[in-house]
Image: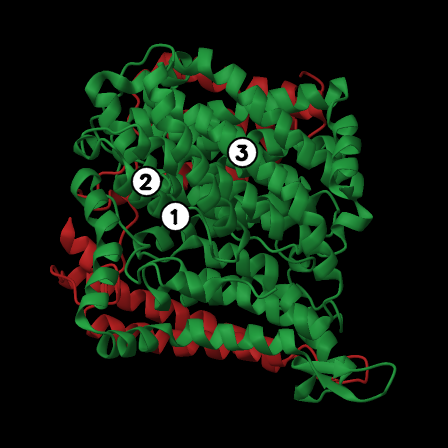
Chain colours: A red, B green
Amino acid sequence: MSEAVAAAGDQPAARPARTRNRAEYGVCVFLALVGVVVLVDALQLSNNRTGVDPLGPKPVPVFVGSLLMVLAVALAVAVTRGSQGEAEAGEDIDLSQPVDIKTVLLLLGVFVANIVLIDFLGWVISGGLLFYGSAIVLGSRHFIRDLVISAALSLGTFYGFAIGLGVGLPAGILQGIL
Amino acid sequence: MESFQFLLNGSATAATPINLLLSLIGVIIGTAVGVLPGIGPAMTVALLLPITYNLEPTGAIIMLAGIFYGGMYGGSTTSILLNTPGESSSVVTAIEGNLMAKGGRAAQALATAAVGSWVAGTIGTLLLAFFAPIVTRFAISLGAPEYFAVMLLAFIAVTAVLGSSRLRGFISLALGLTVGLVGLDSVSGQARLTFGIPQLGDGIDIVVVAVGIFALGEALWVAAHLRRQVAEVIPVGRPWMGKSDFKRSWKPWLRGTALGFPFGAIPAGGAEIPTFLSYITEKRLTKHPEEFGKGAIEGVAGPEAANNASAAGTMVPMLSLGLPTNATAAVMLAALVSYGIQPGPLLLQREGDLVWGLIASLFIGNTLLLILNLPLAPMWAKLLRIPRPYLYAGILFFASMGAYAVNGSSFDLILLLVFGLIGFGMRRFGLPVLPLIVAVILGPRVELQGRRALQLSSGDVKGLFGSVDVATGQFQLSALAIVVYVIIVLILLWPLIFKVIRKVLPAKAAAVIEEISEEPALAVAEHHHVEVTQTDEGPSRTENTETPK
């Protein structure tokens, strides 16, 4: 672990994997892209400076956009010198394994399904599916028990939050039944 | 003694049956959620925000205070009973705490953590009650140039002092500033970065950003690396401590409190540095040095008290200046904004009842926590065995619910997803999340103050360094603003300065600095395999980050 401590700064790390580096350059590209978007958006602002507002709305986004570009370059330089981001550790995290892309993509799929369905199906069904789907994607194999828990959670939160506490959750197609 | 009078009034607010009940519910839910592995105090507060949406603000903030303390307490329980700590603030507690638990002294470790939290929380809250009005008086006297400079300092401090890589800190900051730009410009009314999407006109709700970064990002990140065999939980009975444990604990509690509070109160103080310092101090002062590394109770008592005192300290800049200095404070500020309360120097004047009610409820919540948690600890320990698929599915579920409920719109779920992905990327590439969330909250306000300062000087840059005296019509430099700018420059140039010091200083002094810097790092690295982020620059940074008075 001492190598991770050594790598904590922007110092050369002991295990420069090529794919990791490529991903780091991806961060640079992302930053540069965001920078371009911010700058382009800033340029279309009309900068009517007034006595009330001598600076106008333009300079700050121009500054932020430029900052992003500068940081993108700085990171690229740092990465060529061996800088690596230190992946975050945690109680349930096993960093010795590579990123489990399949699980992440499936989870994202379940999440997107919820976005698409929530207004139509309502929170009880859509949220229940979200929990059910996520639990299975994350490795639960108790299909019946999971279903019961999902239903209990989504009904419980709907009655507790939407009806009990007045939090705005949609009833969807179950409107009138719940 | 005005604080005392206000505090009494605040107690009257906080002690109404309904507010007591809210505090109790907050403490219980906060602990239950905070105990869950992978959920730190910031995420606990973010996930539980929806509960408070329809309460009136005072009740809501009282409940949040309960959730906050509960979440903190839950976090330390987790780090003692599991062998890998989650959030950085309980890393140090976990070192000796987990060793004690393994050695069969889990009950004593939990007890000294619980009582230490209570002692530190109570003293810390007293100090908060004492300092909040003083700092507020100072804050109200700040003009736009000074306030601009102080907020800038908060930015730089959070970005450059905390975390392992300054570059990555600044990247996070810049991303946060970008998010803060989205929406109609508050002065000119022009749309910035809205891409013609009407929902973006009001800007991106900070709650959505916080839930996305803290909850969704974390859940996705864990899902990508889920430990297949669940970490071992150490069984525990009811926490208790004997006379000798008590004797060994009370001094570390007080010393930890003394270290924690000031660090919490300065921008970029955080809980990491004081908990480390407390650990080193106790290790030096203990009469049982042989137990360190095998589970010494002082090593739990001190850092845990420092952690809680620092949390109370964080409330000082949060309530009196509107400056968030750690992630939890950032989320709580976001909550205040969502109740329609404007944080800032005028908070204490405009919302005196709310602020004093909050401070009083911190006392109450803290005490409830102690009474509840000593007997409930075995139950909390059972929560650690929750099947991980349910835990992380639950985070996705509650995060979606909370984000949807902000505006009752599925558009916010799309934003949530975007920020979840950003949060995932940040964890993957070691970008610290705190600068981002602070920038989202403070960015727009920094811009506003900066523009206001320039407005007073009719656009002259010197408007950022002082203002025109109304009485004489003469331009006067603001000593405070300049001192703050000097501190900012010092922080930015610190790595250079440090190099020079190293060269100039006699070898012996340098060695001492080295030793102090490396000691806790090694201790943690040896025992726990967690990243150590705070210690590379040693204790000398203390002088640097002190706020000017």
Question: Numbered disc 2: what chain?
Answer: B
How far apart are the two marked residues, 1 and 2, measured between alpha carbons?
8 Å
Q: Position of residue B254 (x, y in %)?
A: 45, 36
Kindly identify the residue that appears in the image at 51 percent across and 45 percent down: B261
Dividing the picture into quarters, in which one does residue A96 lie?
top left
Pointer 2 residue: B91
Please state which amino acid type lies under the numbered disc 3.
Gly
Pointer 3 residue: B121
Answer with mark 3 or mark 1, whichever residue precedes in sequence: 3
Proximity of marks 3 and 1: CB atoms separated by less than 8 Å: no
B170, B285: nearer the viewer: B285
User: Neighbour class for label 3 at 10 Å: few (<14), some, many (≥20)?
Assistant: many
Q: Nearer the viewer, mark 2 or mark 3?
A: 3
Question: Numbered disc 1: what chain?
Answer: B
Please state which amino acid type lies under the numbered disc 2.
Val
Q: Which mark is residue B272?
A: 1
Location of residue B29 with respect to B139 vertically, above or below: above
A112, B370: nearer the viewer: B370
Are the residues flagged by discs 3 and 1 from a single subunit?
yes
How far apart are the two marked residues, 2 and 3, measured between alpha carbons?
19 Å
